[in-house]
Amino acid sequence: MRTRSVWVLDDEDDPIVDSIAAGIGRTPARLLAYLLLRAERETDLTTNVHLQIGTGTNRTTISEAMARLEARDLVERTTVSAAASGGRPRTAWQPAAGIEPTIETTYESHARALLELAESFRGGAATEPRAEAAAPSDSPIEFALNWRPNALHVPIYAAIAAEWYDAFGVDVRLEHRDGSRRALERVVSGTAELALAGAATVVRAREAGEPIVPVAPLYQRAMTVLYTVRETFGEPLQSVDQLEGRRVGMPPNAETRLLGRLFLSQITFDEDIAVVDTNGEERDALRRGEADVVTGSIADPRELEREGATVDVLPVTDHFPIYGPTIIAHKRTLDERAREIGNVLAGTTGGWAAARRDPGPAAERIAAESDDPPERIRRTFACAAADFGTSDAVRERGWGWHRAEMWDRLRTALAQGVLLGDAA
């Protein structure tokens, strides 16, 4: 009996798999990484048998994934001759380029796919007729972020630190705004090409007729929480039922308020809950006893824990899924500067992969612009990425993928909670 060995992908190859997966999804990334790495080790072409054994993937899944890789020009299909294969000719594949150029091409093609996806979300408010695509511009892309520099911005800072925006020839200028609405207004006014804004804020703006388009969620789930300290609440906060008759503090005109109100609207006794406006930090309202529970982001309860308080948390998205902070653009910008926006998306895909691999360089940059030490920024991002950054869509298609039904579900929930209008 003739035997032969087959090289197998293992855990040591995960860094390359992870880098590719950010731009195409986990299964195609494993197959593409196998092709790239095997080409460096073996001289014969890679067949279906190699892929099945080497990646542990079944034939049907291989067929579907390889079709996607071929469509993006990342691999080339060929044939192993009958003489070489000891029988009839067999299909084989080889990577179209080496590892680094393949990763760049993966991100470029992913950006094009995200732009095509954005086209399907253009509906809503009517705007001026579609403009002809303009010639590429060398002017910077102004990117308005939804808050001061913090751990949740790590992927964007990682794209800068790892020079991914430079790699795709785009000059990204960051500006920081006080909240999602302020960031969104920069896009509406045309003073910024892109903004990062909470999903509920985006849906409300589109409902109000603003010509904005969700392009890519930076995180797949919102990170809004309800939290309290044991000293104020008087008992462990473990379920929504305990909110009856309580005061819930929320900041005015904020994404966390929208999501907090949405959360409460799903509760049958929501009329027995008093919503208290907080001015300044919500944590201060807890300390002063002005609220029993407050809304915030995932990093806020940790601040109180570091001060020695016993903190209890109810994550809003444990009860219904909502996209997290999302990159948005004006419809006109998508028409006139599609290539540059695509380059930003490609660079941010690289930034996401770089941040998951090592958030350190981005954390150092953010620490230099904030009061948080780098290690705290690293830990907060690692938690956010693990708990809120992935989904079936990301595992299947890559970073930033989103689906119409999720946006429709959020709009329906906001409408049912009477939260689509100005009164929210």
Image: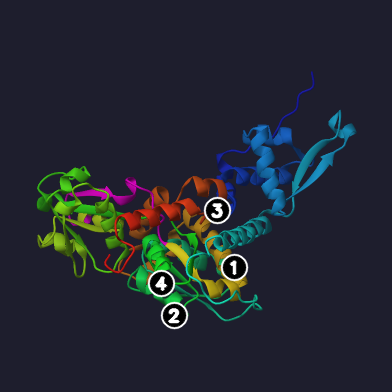
Q: Mark 3 to mark 4: distance in Å?
A: 26 Å
Residue at 61% x, 80% y: name it: 138
Residue 339 placement, left or right of 249: right
User: In front here: 78 or 157?
Assistant: 78
Where, quadrant-wise, is the C terminus in this rendering? bottom left
Q: Is mark 3 on a helix, strand or loop?
A: loop
The label number, if any, that marks residue 22 in the structure image: 3
Q: Position of residue 168 (x, y in %)?
A: 61, 68
In the figure, residue 72 lies in which quadrant? Answer: bottom right
Rate crowding at label 4 as few (under 14), some (14 to 19) or many (20 or more) other CA atoms within 10 Å. many
Q: Which amino acid does label 3 sit on?
A: Ala
Q: Which amino acid does label 1 sit on?
A: Asn
Query: Reading the chain from its start, which is encountered first: label 4 or label 2?
Result: 4
- Tag 2 residue: 189
Residue 153 placement, left or right of 289: right
Residue 314 drawn in magenta? yes
Q: Mark 3 to mark 2: distance in Å?
A: 32 Å
- Tag 1 residue: 343
